[in-house]
Image (tube, grey):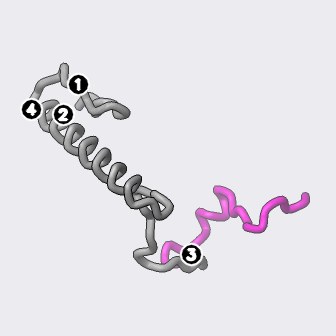
Amino acid sequence: MEQLFWYSFLGAERVMRVPITRRGSKWELFGARNPTLAADGDAEAAREAVTRLRAFREAYRAALMRWRAGERDVVHAAGCEPPPPS
């Protein structure tokens, strides 16, 4: 069988034989950037994005607090779903 990818795939049986003390071989920089927003150097777009993100998070937080308090007909922030029933 021809290997189609540059990486190998162990499969379920082989992965169960790997010691739990073995570490992955891929090195990644700790704390590398994983940005929430990208504005490509446009300061105005960055400010607008930050403002909208803060407003979304505040609306989400307020709705979640009301939902946790027992109010089940809360309107959540646009673009998100209410938490699953507990």
Q: Is residue 80 magenta?
A: no
Q: Is residue 33 left or right of residue 59?
A: right
**Residue at 18%, 33% in the rendered image:** 63
Q: Quadrant of residue 3?
A: bottom right
The answer to whether mark 2 and mark 1 are in CB contact below 8 A is yes
Under circle 1, the secondary element is loop
Of badges 2 and 3, nearer the viewer stands 2
Under circle 3, the secondary element is loop
Magenta span covers which residues? Answer: 1-24
Instruction: Using a 10 Å C-alpha cutoff, classify the residue at mark 4 as few (fewer than 14 neighbours), some (14 to 19) or many (20 or more).
Output: few
Residue under pointer 1: 75
Q: Is residue 26 left or right of residue 67?
A: right
Instruction: Using a 10 Å C-alpha cutoff, classify the residue at mark 1 as few (fewer than 14 neighbours), some (14 to 19) or many (20 or more).
Output: some
Of badges 3 and 1, nearer the viewer stands 1
Q: Name the kind of residue labelled 1 in the image.
A: Val
Spatial separation of the CA atoms under disc 3 and disc 1: 44 Å
Q: Earlier in the sequence, mark 3 or mark 1?
A: 3
Spatial separation of the CA atoms under disc 3 and disc 4: 43 Å
In front here: 66 or 22? 66
Q: Is residue 62 above or below residue 76?
A: below
Q: Earlier in the sequence, mark 1 or mark 4?
A: 4
Q: Is residue 23 magenta?
A: yes
Q: Quadrant of residue 30?
A: bottom left
Q: Earlier in the sequence, mark 2 or mark 3?
A: 3
Residue under pointer 3: 24
**Residue at 33%, 55% in the rendered image:** 47
Residue under pointer 4: 69
